[in-house]
């Protein structure tokens, strides 16, 4: 059975051209004019683009005494509804738990996914077992990216010596280090002080995590990555200080990527000053939303290429869960949703405003991350042989975002009331039409795990360069005799 997407304009990260796209066996088999298939999808007036890849989700994640409420079923349904066809979640070992154990737990949960998925592994503690298991996680399990939390002291946070050891191991294995960059010690001190002084509401969450703590940690992570020779990916970059560190590192030839979130690009800190406690608490995430200056910096980073990927960090908690933190902001589960809205929000605020071209939109929502994660061109491409993960994008289609119409399991939406223009007409996951003109046709369990190979081209280049420029002893003649 074949499907043809007819009369659309193909938009990839580097090309725009009119063509039909033929799909068979879950893959793209032909691109050209006048193609015929058993089923036809009309893409007149639409862009035919690689489906979005969200490289930062937390589905059914155990965190702060509860579990995030979107699981792999509702989370991937939300993703597909908004044109995202692959998610990358984080397998999170509990302190002392082995990596393979944690991975098994994530595999048990993800069987319900309706789009393809992969994982990053988190390094939440350090020891011989973690060192040993990293090798098999990379080489046998196909997980090559490892996240380090520099915040959440007393829970997920790792210290500099642990990060150094883990980064060094990743350099040997051809992996990539990811960091949540905030100075966790300073955040813990500021939080305690704020509470002592009677600042207990959600706004104190923002006060406890100023941009300086993110900037410092980003610089520190870049330095440790440079010392160990590992490529670095900084997640949820929210401010100019962190962006400046990444920009500078890239200008120095370091292999560093930055990932802003759609929430930080489009929402600001005024949300935390809302008089309604629930409204403010629903927006508590780390790092917190910033101000216009920082938003402008993030947009400029996407335009200039110093920031590479737009993600969501989708980690959705219900209002009831957020209320665990009434009277103590440090107990509000950290996280917001966005999976369903990332593409429409970025199109509306990015492409429709002229900040991004449609090709740049594809690059930052799909192709760049597929290359970084070493699954390009299977993912992130409209090419013969690629998986048919495709979004047929209707730039004229509009809606007003509202929780009552969303796929996500939670009872609110941080973008509530925003009108977006630019939405999927069809979303295909490996050829299956999961969204058909507003109708959800997702298949629970259709999603498959995407294994990834280590040693992507950037790893290879960086290790060659590090070998070439590494310290060497100077060959000397006439060495003085050692004293007796
Ligand atoms: N970002 C956030 O507040 N929650 C999810 C966990 C993380 O990525 O830090
Ligand atoms: Zn994080
Ligand atoms: Zn996260």
Image: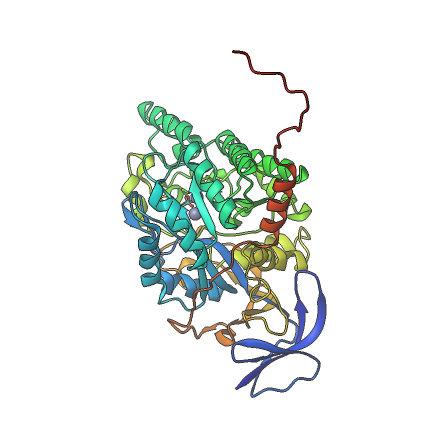
Q: Residue at horizontal 43%, vertical 65%?
A: 449
**Of 322 and 445, which appears nearest the observer?**
445
Q: Position of residue 151 (x, y in %)?
A: 41, 36
Q: Position of residue 367 (x, y in %)?
A: 60, 59
Q: Quadrant of ligand 2?
A: top left
- Splitting the image into 4 quarters, where does residue 36 fall? bottom right
Q: Position of residue 95 (x, y in %)?
A: 30, 43
Q: Residue at horizontal 55%, vertical 73%?
A: 388
> Is 424 left or right of 329, judged from the image as shown?
right
Q: Residue at horizontal 31%, vertical 57%?
A: 105
How is colour applied across the structure in the image?
A: rainbow
Q: Residue at horizontal 37%, vertical 29%?
A: 188
**Of 207 and 309, which appears nearest the observer?**
309
Is residue 408 visible from the viewing direction of this image?
yes
**Of 267 and 131, which appears nearest the observer?**
131
**Residue 83 against residue 181 in the figure, above or below:** below
Q: Position of residue 206 (x, y in %)?
A: 44, 34
> Is 249 left or right of 429, judged from the image as shown?
right
**Of 333 and 137, which appears nearest the observer?**
137
Is residue 416 visible from the viewing direction of this image?
no
């Amino acid at each position: 059975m074949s499907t043809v997407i007819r009369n659309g304009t193909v938009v990839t990260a580097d090309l725009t051209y009119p063509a039909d796209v033929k799909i068979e066996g879950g893959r793209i088999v032909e691109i050209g004019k006048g193609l015929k298939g058993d089923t036809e999808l009309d893409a007149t007036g639409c862009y035919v683009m690689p489906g979005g890849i969200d490289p930062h989700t937390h589905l059914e994640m155990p965190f702060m005494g509860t579990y995030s409420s979107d699981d792999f079923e509702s989370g991937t349904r939300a993703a597909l509804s908004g044109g995202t066809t692959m998610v990358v979640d984080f397998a999170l070992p509990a302190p002392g738990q082995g990596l393979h154990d944690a991975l098994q737990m994530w595999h048990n949960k993800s069987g319900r996914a309706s789009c393809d998925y992969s994982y990053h592994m988190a390094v939440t503690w350090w020891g011989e077992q973690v060192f040993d298991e990293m090798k098999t996680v990379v080489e046998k399990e196909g997980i090559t990216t490892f996240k380090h939390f520099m915040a959440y002291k007393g829970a997920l946070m790792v210290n500099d010596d642990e990060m150094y050891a883990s980064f060094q191991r990743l350099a040997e294995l051809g992996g990539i280090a990811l960091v949540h960059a905030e100075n966790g010690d300073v955040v813990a001190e500021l939080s305690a002080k704020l509470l002592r002084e009677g600042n207990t509401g959600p706004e104190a969450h923002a006060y406890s995590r100023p941009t300086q703590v993110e900037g410092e940690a980003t610089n520190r992570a870049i330095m440790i990555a440079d010392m160990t020779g590992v490529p670095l990916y900084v997640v949820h970059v929210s401010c100019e200080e962190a962006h400046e560190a990444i920009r500078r590192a890239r200008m120095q030839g370091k292999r560093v990527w930055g990932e802003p979130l759609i929430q930080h690009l489009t929402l600001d800190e005024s949300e935390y000053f809302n008089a309604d406690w629930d409204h403010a608490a629903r927006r508590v995430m780390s790092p917190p939303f910033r101000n216009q200056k920082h938003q402008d910096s993030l947009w400029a980073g996407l335009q200039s290429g110093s920031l590479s990927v737009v993600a969501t960090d989708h980690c959705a908690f219900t209002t009831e869960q957020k209320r665990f933190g009434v009277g103590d902001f440090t107990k509000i589960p950290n996280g917001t949703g966005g999976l369903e809205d990332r593409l429409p929000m970025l199109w509306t605020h990015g492409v429709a405003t002229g900040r991004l071209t449609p090709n740049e939109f594809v690059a930052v929502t799909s192709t760049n991350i597929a290359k970084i994660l070493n699954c390009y061109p299977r993912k992130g491409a409209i090419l013969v042989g690629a998986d048919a993960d495709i979004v047929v994008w209707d730039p004229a289609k509009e809606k007003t975002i509202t929780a009552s119409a969303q796929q996500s399991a939670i009872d609110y939406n941080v973008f509530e009331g925003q009108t977006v223009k630019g939405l999927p007409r069809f979303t295909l996951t490996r050829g299956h039409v999961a969204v058909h003109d507003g109708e959800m046709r997702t298949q629970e369990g259709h999603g498959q795990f995407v294994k990834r190979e280590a040693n992507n081209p950037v790893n290879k280049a960086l290790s060659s360069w590090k070998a070439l420029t590494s310290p060497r002893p100077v060959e000397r003649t006439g060495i003085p005799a050692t004293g007796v």
